[in-house]
Amino acid sequence: MAKTICIANQKGGVGKTTTSVNLSSALATMGKRVLLIDMDPQGNASSGLGIKRYESQDANSYHVLIGEKTLTEAIQNTSNGNLKISTANPDLVGAEIELVDMPQREYRLKQAIATVADQFDFVIIDCPPSLGLITLNALNAADSFLVPLQCEYYALEGLSQLLNTAGLIKKNLNPQLHIEGIVLTMFDARNNLSHQVVTEIKNHFGDKVFNAIIPRNVRLSEAPSHGQSIFEYDSKSIGAQRYLELAKEVVARAQGKVSVEAPSLAEQ
Ligand code: ADP
Ligand code: MG
């Protein structure tokens, strides 16, 4: 059965999509069977893996969410045989509104994933930068959520809101939900502030912070415009190395080799 991890932070530009694409690709490179579900109407994870918009207009995450297509119908191959994707495009904006009147509106993604869970080791969900119904569906469908935090002054801003929302979902909808971990992104070793943010977040969140810290790396920002993960674009780059380390930690946590203190989300 797949472990479902949702990549969430309602702030934009913190590295959710970069982490979704490259963590998924790293896991696939390690031989895991991975499904990446693009849940952001911007569709950056889809284009970042080289899927053109016209290639997925008939069946994508939007159709799955509103029940027009099955997830199996929406799943497409990528250039890595172990990595499949359900794509997104701007249609998904409409789903937020269409879902409001639909039965089981918070459970639609969960139900869809259940139909393919035996075919994958990991399902990774790339969330939009909001805490609307789409992110709610993702958190409800997930075993855990992974939070990318940018190494900058306002890194923690909004995090308590995300933890509150996750706490409410855990209490009311999805009792198994827990935090997978926090991954620090866009770390700049020459910048004192980056070091301060790392120290502060580690003091605050302890072993929930992944050891792998993702540096600011131009190769990571170039790869999507070539429709490639960092492992295809530049597998020797520091960005590729760090995402591989992150994937190893995620696998170790999934196998229960690392005990991460269970956060008391419900009390948040
Ligand atoms: P989000 O999905 O949270 O909005 P993205 O993953 O799209 O964030 O990242 C925002 C921008 O920053 C993108 O242009 C991306 O290429 C770039 N970026 C993300 N992570 C890094 C990194 N580690 N080094 C350099 N650029 C990065
Ligand atoms: Mg994104």
Image (spheres, grey):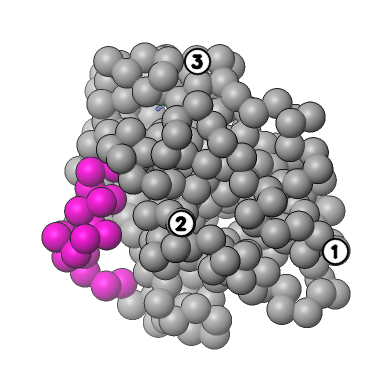
Q: Quadrant of the C terminus?
A: bottom left
Q: Is mark 2 within 8 Å of ligand 2?
A: no
Q: Which residue is mark 3?
A: 222
Q: Where is residue 210 shown, x and y percent of the image?
A: 25, 47
Tell me where the magenta segment starts and ends, as one range: 247-263
Q: Marks 3/2: CA distance?
A: 31 Å
Q: Residue furthest left?
A: 257
Identify the residue at image location x=62%, y=65%: 112
Is the Cβ of the residue at disc 2 closer than 8 Å to that at disc 1?
Answer: no
For label 1, the SS is helix
Q: Marks 2/1: CA distance?
A: 29 Å
Vertical side of 83 occupied by 10: above or below: below
- Between 262 and 144, the residue placed more toward the observer is 144
Asked if one can make out residue 33 in the rendered structure from this viewpoint, the answer is: yes
Q: Is mark 3 within 8 Å of ligand 1?
A: yes
Q: Where is residue 234 shown, x and y percent of the image?
A: 36, 14
Q: Which residue is mark 1?
A: 98
Q: Which residue is mark 2?
A: 119
Identify the residue at image location x=57%, y=66%: 115
Vertical side of 180 occupied by 92: above or below: above
Vertical side of 75 occupied by 65: above or below: below
Circle nearer the viewer, 3 or 2: 2
Is the Cβ of the residue at disc 3 closer than 8 Å to that at disc 1?
Answer: no
Vertical side of 43 occupied by 268: above or below: below
Taking 194 as reference, is 76 left or right? right
Taking 175 as reference, is 38 left or right? right
Reply yes or no: does residue 262 show up in magenta.
yes
Q: Compare marks 2 and 1 and give the one earlier in the sequence.
A: 1
- Between 203 and 249, the residue placed more toward the observer is 249
Q: Is mark 1 within 8 Å of ligand 2?
A: no
Q: Marks 3/1: CA distance?
A: 35 Å
Q: Quadrant of the N terminus?
A: bottom left
